[in-house]
Amino acid sequence: MYDYGYTGKNGLMSSVNSAASQGVGVTIWIVFAFIAALVGCFLVYFLFVKKDGKLNNPKLEWLRSFLRFDKMVIEVILKIAYIFAAIFTTLAPFAFLALGFAGFISCLLTIVFGNILIRIGYEAMLMGVMIWKNTTEINKKIK
């Protein structure tokens, strides 16, 4: 009698049993990772980030200011992403024009209005960063 690949060494059931046994190991690892992350989070926060005073090592001081969000990385990332999006929006319509998917007017409109919309979107995102920077500056002057 033929089992149609459901049993045996390479059959479906052996694959299911193997996946189930691997699933237990993955579950244990996920639980371990969660507990380790929770313990590490509290240790780093209370022993390193929240602690006042100057650190002797400049690399550790940079790490602490990074973890305290004293300097925002998002501003640089947004500026780079804007430049990429603007260049891509300017160059991509030419591929549609060359392939015959779109006409010259639609490509020109995509370039113009696409760049305008991208600029408005990125300016809106950067306004939040600028508000944060100005608030931080005012806060430092008050202290």
Image (cartoon, helix red, strand yellow):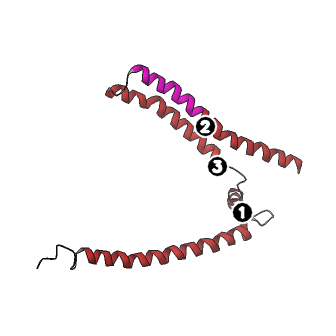
* Corner quadrant of residue 122: top right
What whole-number distance in Å separates the C-alpha atoms at marks 3 and 2?
15 Å
Q: Nearer the viewer, residue 90 or 103?
A: 103
What whole-number distance in Å separates the C-alpha atoms at marks 2 and 1?
36 Å
* Corner quadrant of residue 16: bottom left
Asked whether disc 1 touches disc 3, contact meaning CB atoms under 8 Å apart, the reply is no
117 drawn magenta? yes
Asked whether disc 3 touches disc 2, contact meaning CB atoms under 8 Å apart, the reply is no
What residue is rendered at 43% in x and 78% in y? 24
**As shown in the figure, which amino acid type bears the numbered disc 1?**
Asn
What residue is rendered at 16% in x and 76% in y? 3
Q: Which residue is mark 1?
A: 57
Which numbered disc flags the more N-terminal residue, 1 or 3? 1
For the magenta stretch, what is the residue range?
A: 104-119
Q: Which mark is residue 122?
A: 2
**As shown in the figure, which amino acid type bears the numbered disc 3?**
Val
In this view, the mark in front (1 or 3): 3
**As shown in the figure, which amino acid type bears the numbered disc 2?**
Tyr
Asked whether disc 2 touches disc 1, contact meaning CB atoms under 8 Å apart, the reply is no
Q: Which residue is mark 3?
A: 73
Q: Nearer the viewer, residue 39 or 51?
A: 39
View extreme (left): residue: 1
Which numbered disc flags the more N-terminal residue, 2 or 1? 1
Overall secondary structure of the magenta section: helix
Q: Residues within 10 Å of mark 2 (few under 14, many from 20)?
A: some
x and y, in percent, of residue 77 in the image: 59, 45
In this view, the mark in front (2 or 1): 2
